[in-house]
Amino acid sequence: MKNYFFILLLMVSLNGFSQKITGKVTYTISMEAFSEKKLDSIIKSTSNNKKANIFLKEMFKNADDVKASLAFTNKESIYIIEDNLQNDGKSKLNLNRILAGASDIYYKNIELEENYRESSSLGELMLIEIESKKWQITQESKTIGNYLCYKAIDINSRNTKMKPIAWFTPLIPISFGPKEYSGLPGLILEVEMFNSKIVATKIVLNPNEEIIIEKPSKGKRITIEEYDDFIKKFEKSRKRF
């Protein structure tokens, strides 16, 4: 029965991938609200500095929902946060916005086998490689909007507390999704992480206007290993002062 399910899923996906599909998805990213007790526990385990703790507490409290968009064609996609950083004329730091991708631009091209994000890390613009996901697809399903979706688990995730879960629909046979989440036989409509969730709230398929994707090209291309080394060197230099 399990093998039949995967064969059927593959057949539906292969049939769809041969069709021309373009579109745009709007996602809402929300963060779990913590109780004061739980919030204090998280902050105390993070830092012993009182000023830093006050700053962290404000960051956790300031976690308004944000919106992001994914534009795609058959061969490529681009994901960006739509909300800006302004609120009533004042700049505010939204932790949820940071977790959702902040000002990074996520780009994937299947034909060219490119998968990276444009990021201004510590003042330096980079094009950082994104590792391919290894998914465990299950037969568990649920409906999101008008689409039947199946559950997939990101088994190679570095998150040890909770492996991210993606819900994808083979009814839209596009191998893309929000942020770095992609590589499934269908569009990802929802991602569940440790304390936040990304959910598709609007889907427009084959719109009248042409979907034009501007490929991010500014910055130095680096691998994920090179980026990790860059961050480690920065942390070491910071500890010297």
Image: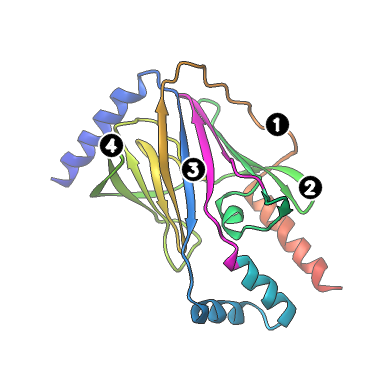
Judged by depth in the image, the label closer to the viewer, 1 or 3, is: 3
Q: In the rendered structure, which amino acid carries the disc numbered 3?
A: Pro
Judged by depth in the image, the label closer to the viewer, 3 or 2, is: 3
Tell me which corner region of the image, top left, top right, bottom left or bottom right, holds residue 3: top left
Judged by depth in the image, the label closer to the viewer, 1 or 4, is: 4
Q: Residue 147 location in percent, x, y?
A: 28, 37
* Callout 1–callout 3 Cβ contact below 8 Å: no
The residue wearing badge 4 is 146
Query: Nearer the N terminus, badge 2 or badge 1?
Result: 2
Give the Cα distance between marks 3 and 4: 19 Å
Give the Cα distance between marks 4 and 2: 42 Å
The residue wearing badge 2 is 124
Q: Which residue range is magenta in the image? A: 60-84
Query: Nearer the N terminus, badge 4 or badge 2?
Result: 2
The residue closer to the viewer here, 184 or 195, is: 195
Q: Residue 7 location in percent, x, y?
A: 21, 36
Q: In the rendered structure, which amino acid carries the disc numbered 2?
A: Glu
Residue 217 circle label: 1
Give the Cα distance between marks 3 and 2: 24 Å
Report the side of 30 relative to 217 (left or right).
left
The residue wearing badge 3 is 178
Instruction: Using the image, determine if residue 17 lies above or below residue 175.
Output: above
